[in-house]
Amino acid sequence: MVKYIIKRLILLIPVLLGVSIMVFVVMHVFQADPASIILGQHATAEQIEKLRQELGLNNPLYVQYWDFLKGALQGDLGSSLITKTPVVKEILSRFPATIELALAAIIIASIFGISIGVISAVKQNSIVDYIGMVFALLGVSMPIFWLGLILIVIFAVQMHLLPVAGRIQIGLEPAHITGFYLIDSLLTGNMASFKSALSHIILPAVALGSYSTAIIARMTRSTMLEIIGQDYIRTARAKGLVEKVVILQHALRNALIPIITVIGLQLGSLLGGAVLTETVFSWPGVGSYTVEAILKSDYPVVQGAVILLAVVFVLVNLAVDLLYAYLDPRIKYS
Amino acid sequence: MEALLEVVNLKKYFPVESGFLKKSVEYVKAVDDVSFKIYRGETLGLVGESGCGKSTTGRMLVNLLKPTSGEVRFEGKDITKLKGAEEREFRKNIQIIFQDPYASLNPRMTVGDIIAEPIKINRLAKGEEVEKRVLKLLEYVGLASYHRNRYPHEFSGGQRQRVGIARALAVNPKLIVCDEPVSALDVSIQAQVLNLLDDLQKEFKLTYLFIAHGLNVVKHVSDRVGVMYLGKLVEIGDADSLYDNPLHPYTKALLSAIPVPDPAKKRERIILSGDVPSPLNPPEGCRFHTRCQSCMEICKKKEPELKDVGQNHRVACHLY
Amino acid sequence: MELNREENVMLEGGVEKTSSPWRNIWSELVKNKAAMVGLSIIVILILIALFGKYLMPYDPNTGVLAESLQKPSSAHIFGTDEQGRDIFSRIIDGTKISLRVGITAVAIALTAGIIFGSFAGYYGGKIDMYIMRLMDIILAFPSLLLAIAFMSALGKGIDKAIIAISIVTIPEYARIVRGSILSVKENEYVQAAKAIGNNDMGIIFKHILPNVMSPIIVRATLGISTAILETSALGFLGLGIQPPQAEWGSMLGAGRGYFYNAPHIVLFPGIAITITVLAFNLFGDGLRDALDPKLRK
Amino acid sequence: MLLQVKNLKTQFKVKGGVVNAVDGVDFEIDRGEVVSIVGESGSGKSVTSLSIMGLIPNPPGKVIDGEILFKGEDLLKKTKKELQNIRGNEISMIFQEPMTSLNPVFTIGKQISEALIKHKNMSREEALKKSIEMLELVGIPSPEKRVKDYPHQLSGGMRQRVMIAMALACGPELLIADEPTTALDVTIQAQILDLMLKLKDKLGTSILLITHDLGVVAEVSDRVVVMYCGKVVEKGTVMEIFERPLHPYTEGLLLSIPRVDEKHDKLFMIPGVVPNPLNMPKGCAFADRCHRCEEICKKEVPPLVEYEGRQVRCFRYLNHKEGKV
């Protein structure tokens, strides 16, 4: 098992190299000239040329990439063109917010998605099934940023039940332990902080998780239907097991294998979706930071954020593959 | 008699990759040094249990699989080394019909197109001639001309198998490899297809290699029969002599295991113990020794050769 | 169940009419009400995209500032936006962009995916490894994020949105095509095609691809919805189609500053996106049910 | 009588209509007996066995008429819960595909234990101990180790042994075996049949064997029920059926099997195919393929008639009895 993990991590190297080359090339070939961005509209040609020289932008691309790679390996992804702060530092300080939001969303999505899917499959073609599947269909058809806006209008603006935006009421931030406000406030026993953090995370997590909930529900339903038709389910029934055991033990346990794959993929795409949700809810995470950077053409930030999120995504996939081995005895990694 | 096809020291090893970074490769020895001849106009039956390599052998004869080593000589010419146009030219001589009539026909083509395809690809006829041939072939296999524009899913298993036979006949082959052609069919349909194959053999002077696990079917159709076990040919001889007087302990056990539809005949059965060993790691010496009731010391060490015991009968066993 | 095969048993004498597999699928699809609703909406949307200019009460791109942020009324049935433009006209105008991006992006990605996937699946070995590694690299990004990165580098505009969205979805099609090809490659009818003398291209195009098209077509239909959602997301972030050109996502993005007081400004574009995406999803689901005999009853 | 099936009718709703998969089937099984139901695909033999178990998937299937008396009580009138207490306990079943009939994610020990825990109120440890005993009984080497294996680690023959161990764990009075050896190789098939017969004698279980293989039927059964298109066409002891088949279908079937112990140049052939279940002929379902077909056969469905103490569904014997032919 350890050997397998090491092997997978080694195999990640070419993928990550490919990822970095792709991002780097795309950013440098097509991007507007960073020097003119830094200096603004009124800069003279000489000034720009001088800065290009300083930034090493006149070197051949592979030299620039090599410099970038050397830096990246030492944990230096360059500095923001605008604020001049190191990209890694900025991103890491925002990372917990994004992860907290994504985890909250995936937990909501898994719980609701799997439950709806199982119930729909068991009650196939009943009214419950239809309602569940109509909701799931809406879930995959609504843009999450629009759902976010609508949720704000209803629950924050009209009903005043939940806050409009932000991560926590200003001044209530808990002491930094893990960086996750919900956990940190519980650890320090700060209930006011916890309540505020919880009320802030509900709407964005629901908005972000809606698409995944729907995908997981649909996937669970079709997988369960397929598995219920398998020979070994007939065997379980022939043994005289009660239907609950047949469904929840024999069928769901087998269905979990593909479901986990989908959840893993969704967790990855949530990181992408976070860009939208964070923008809508002014959530101070990596996503909203990246969007700002894009709009300001702050390419080192975009480059750093994209690479970092890709690394997280790839690691999530690895974790999913390892979960397989636990769930499916037929898979043994060696 | 003249051999139409001769198989010489045929081997097929499938690599199984394993290990970490440095690739250590193991081999599944699906067919391991098999030699036999098929004479013009005869039916050679090939029997054995799943995994014995009988189908792999069949596919190598049709050039669907390239052998690891060894030769397949068709009319004296080694066909395993053919390439390009020569290979295509050769394919006309040997055709194959498959086990599963539901999987062996392209579901998106009409039956007529399926039968016409080999004629067109091999340029055996042009224009209206193609159509005439297709209808003729349908007639040969007992289908009607109105079946021409139907799709495979509209046919029953037996009818689909007839289409498969017509497709094989389309290029006027000399040899047809029948790979379990009736195993998936019901008993009453099985008899229809077996009789059809028999009629066609007489009409077109065909030679068959008949691969099956049903020993009764093989006995019915074959002039000679070969028995395979774990990639090896263990016994081969005239059908009557082999069934009446089986020599290899495996053949004996196999024959005694067939249920006979006659409750009055209660026979002494030889029940073999255990399973067939993995072809990834076959036993040393005689491959059957782990399950053999007559196993001797030598069987565990030395691999027996196929020995002629007279009357066209050969067996690979240290007992003889 | 042993009944399934017998269902297809045809009577000698040919009473039943010949039915091609494609015609069967269509008759199956027609029975699916949800799919037909989806298909009808798609047809209407295409008509709107083609002839929308005759339906627009106002010029979608010019507004009267004095009439900005008006609530829906008889003059402006969906109200007006922050620049006083008629939202109804803009939504109609936006239809053609969403459809164009969605359909073209999928068409490009599908073509590339079929080529990559077929070669990888049919030939296997090194070719397979190189192609799939390349796909892995693209797949290492959450797709929306990669599209954003491409857009921020390529610059804004509809063509670039199409390119960005198609590139990020190629691996998905390549994988499906490859997987399907692997699953039918060993089928006996493919072996038979080889035995009668077909060459590789004949086998791929005549015997393999037609038999693996079902999941690919389904995926492509559903892929159009994803592409439309991604277009709108890019527009929302201000990266997609540039103003004043009307695009549903960018309408939402622009209206974001005003939606506390004028929720209609975000309500209608969002509904338009949802309906369009829903239509393709309904149709795609119906296609899948019709094409997948396992789910057929 | 251990089991009496009376006028059983099971329907399936399929695209294009309703199929009467089982259409008025009667037969019985005594204690300690092996009764075989034999027929080709589409004959309704498997549906019959699933109907007895109450495992017909509904929808699309449904038992619409008849009685299934097990020890005198009608299984069709039992509640879901009562049925669950009978299944796996008093009646159990093994299936054709040992490769897919075991749940891939549980150990075989767990899968055998389940029934014991449910029906015999055993603790986990007791059930596991009993499972090991069962594995030993069905001839699986080193059962203490194998009990922790997953199905994919076993060969096809071994899996079918596990299925048998599982089915017999609670000591059922009736074992329904649906094509138990069809998917297995000849030598393994012989092992499994041998094992089933030995265990039957040892445990006194009655067996209902569903198969298409007349060879297997001849080897193991006491009595035989021949089915065609959802109906019983002939019943009798194994000797009667094989020595002197009455129904033309049985006769044709027996003649069309190639045999190792005899050599014919041509096989007897039953022409044509099984009729479309959605479009059954008006008279006898076999009439179109029958070599002894008469006018009446195409018009009316023949009844099951008594003839020489046996039952057969054919007009020839009805007339014979009345002395006309």
Image: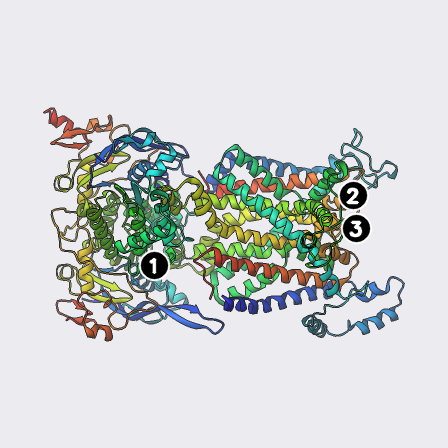
Q: CA distance from mark 1 to mark 2?
A: 67 Å
**What is the residue that sits farthest to the left in this orientation?**
D323
Q: Is residue C4 left or right of residue B204?
A: right
Q: Amino acid at mark 2?
A: Gly
Q: CA distance from mark 3 to mark 1?
A: 62 Å
- Location of residue D182 in the rendering, given as x and y in whole percent from the top left corner: 28, 50
User: Is residue B63 placed above or below A233 in the rendered structure?
Assistant: below
Between disc 3 and disc 2, the foreground one is 3
Chain identifier of the residue bearing label 3 in the image: A
Residue at screen point 62% across, 66% down = A16
Q: Nearer the viewer, residue A334 or B14?
A: A334
Q: Amino acid at mark 1?
A: Arg
Q: Nearer the viewer, residue B18 or A193?
A: A193
Chain identifier of the residue bearing label 1 in the image: D
Q: Nearer the viewer, residue B255 or D74?
A: D74
Q: Quadrant of the N terminus of chain C?
A: top left
Quarter of the image holding residue A187?
Answer: bottom right
User: Is residue C104 placed above or below D6 in the rendered structure?
Assistant: below
Q: Nearer the viewer, residue D276 or A24?
A: A24
Q: Amino acid at mark 3?
A: Ile
Residue D146's disc number? 1
Q: Residues within 10 Å of mark 3 (few under 14, many from 20)?
A: few
Q: Which residue is mark 3?
A: A170
Instruction: Classify mark 3: helix, strand or loop.
Output: loop
Q: Which residue is mark 2?
A: C255
Q: Is residue B216 left or right of residue C295?
A: left
- Location of residue B243 in the rendering, given as x and y in whole percent from the top left corner: 15, 59
Q: Quadrant of the C terminus of chain C?
A: top left
Q: Residues within 10 Å of mark 2 (few under 14, many from 20)?
A: many
Say if residue D243 shows up in the picture.
yes
- Location of residue B5 in the rendering, given as x and y in whole percent from the top left corner: 26, 66
- Badge 3 and badge 1 in a common chain: no
